C-alpha cells in the first residue's frame, strides 16, 4: 500500500521529460523507475555495454551512447530540450562537473547531479546544479529511519525541516479522537487524511476517532513527527 501519492494525483505531470546521463546502478534505477511511472526518459552513457543493457531491458524510451563532456554531442542528442536532466556520473568527478556545467550553460531548467563526496557536491553546486544528491548517504539515512521508526511507512520531505509522512496509528492513539490527542497543540502536526481498508477520510474533523491498524497522513516539522509515540 502506498496511499500518500494517491492523495495528489494532479501533481504528476505526464508530459514531463527526463534525461539521465550515466547509466551505472544509480542512473539505471532512475531510468527504470521514471520509465515505469510513464514518463518519457532518455538514458545516455559513454559506455556501449551500459547503453546496450538499458536498451535490451527497455528501462528507458530512448538510449544513446555519447560523451557528455562534449557540448555538441549533448545538443545533437536533444539533451538541452529536456525539462530535467539527472547527471548520474558520481564516481567521475571531472566528467560530472563538466557535464553539469554544459547542461546548465545551455539553459536546462532543472539539473540534478549525483555526488560522491561533500567536496564534489560543493563543486557541483558552484557550477550550477539545482539539486545535489548523495545516494549512499541517503540510503543509510533511510535504513536508519526504517530501523528506528518502523511505524513510518513513507516520508516525503518538503524541505530540510518539514515532511509529509504516512504513519501507522500508534497503539496509544487507538480509539481516541484527533481533538482528544491534541496533535496540533502537542506536536504541531496537522492530519491530512486517514486511510483504513483502502478508504480515505480527507481532512478529518477533530472528533474523528483513530483506530489501530489504520494509517494517518500528517504534515509538520520533521523533528515533531519523530517525537510521536511509535
Image: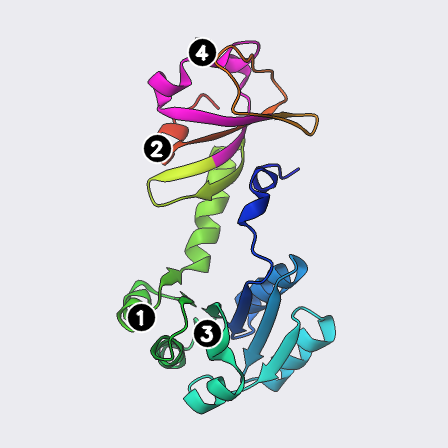
> Horizontally, is 200 left or right of 125 in the view?
right
Residue at 45% in and 91% down: 72
Label 4 vs 2, first from the N-terminus: 4
Residue 179: which numbered mark, if any? 4
User: What is the spatial separation of the Cα atoms under label 1 and label 2, in whole angstroms?
Assistant: 30 Å
Instruction: Tell me whether circle 4 and circle 2 mark residues in contact (CB < 8 Å).
Output: no
According to the picture, the residue beneath numbered tag 1 turns out to be 128
Tag 3 secondary structure: loop
Q: Which residue is mark 3?
A: 89
In terms of sequence position, does the residue under pointer 2 or pointer 3 come before the other? 3
Secondary structure of residue under mark 1: loop
Closer to viewer: mark 3 or mark 1: 1
Which residue is depicted at the point 53% across and 20% down? 204
Residue under label 2:
223
Q: Residues within 10 Å of mark 3 (few under 14, many from 20)?
A: many
Residue bounds of the magenta highlight: 165-194
The answer to whether any part of residue 220 appears in the image is: yes
Amino acid at each position: 500500500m502506498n496511499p500518500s501519492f494517491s492523495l495528489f494525483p494532479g501533481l504528476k505531470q505526464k508530459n514531463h521529460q527526463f534525461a539521465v546521463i550515466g547509466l551505472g546502478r544509480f542512473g539505471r534505477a532512475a531510468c527504470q523507475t521514471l520509465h515505469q511511472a510513464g514518463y518519457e526518459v532518455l538514458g545516455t552513457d559513454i559506455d556501449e555495454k551500459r547503453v546496450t543493457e538499458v536498451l535490451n531491458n527497455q528501462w528507458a524510451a530512448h538510449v544513446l551512447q555519447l560523451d557528455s563532456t562534449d557540448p555538441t554531442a549533448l545538443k545533437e542528442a536533444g539533451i538541452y530540450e529536456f525539462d530535467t536532466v539527472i547527471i548520474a556520473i558520481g564516481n567521475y568527478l571531472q566528467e560530472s562537473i563538466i557535464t553539469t556545467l554544459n547542461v546548465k550553460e545551455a539553459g536546462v531548467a532543472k539539473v540534478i547531479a549525483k555526488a560522491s563526496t561533500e567536496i564534489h557536491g560543493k563543486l557541483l553546486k558552484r557550477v550550477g546544479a539545482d539539486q545535489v544528491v548523495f545516494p549512499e548517504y541517503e540510503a543509510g539515512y533511510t535504513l536508519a529511519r526504517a530501523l528506528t521508526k518502523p511505524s513510518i511507512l513513507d516520508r516525503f520531505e518538503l524541505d530540510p525541516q518539514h515532511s509529509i509522512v504516512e504513519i501507522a496509528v500508534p497503539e496509544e492513539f487507538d480509539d481516541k479522537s484527533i481533538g482528544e490527542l491534541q496533535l496540533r497543540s502537542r506536536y504541531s502536526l496537522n492530519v491530512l487524511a486517514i486511510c483504513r481498508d483502502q478508504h480515505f477520510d480527507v481532512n478529518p474533523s477533530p472528533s474523528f476517532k483513530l483506530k489501530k491498524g489504520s494509517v494517518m497522513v500528517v504534515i509538520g516539522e520533521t523533528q515533531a513527527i519523530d517525537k510521536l509515540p511509535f
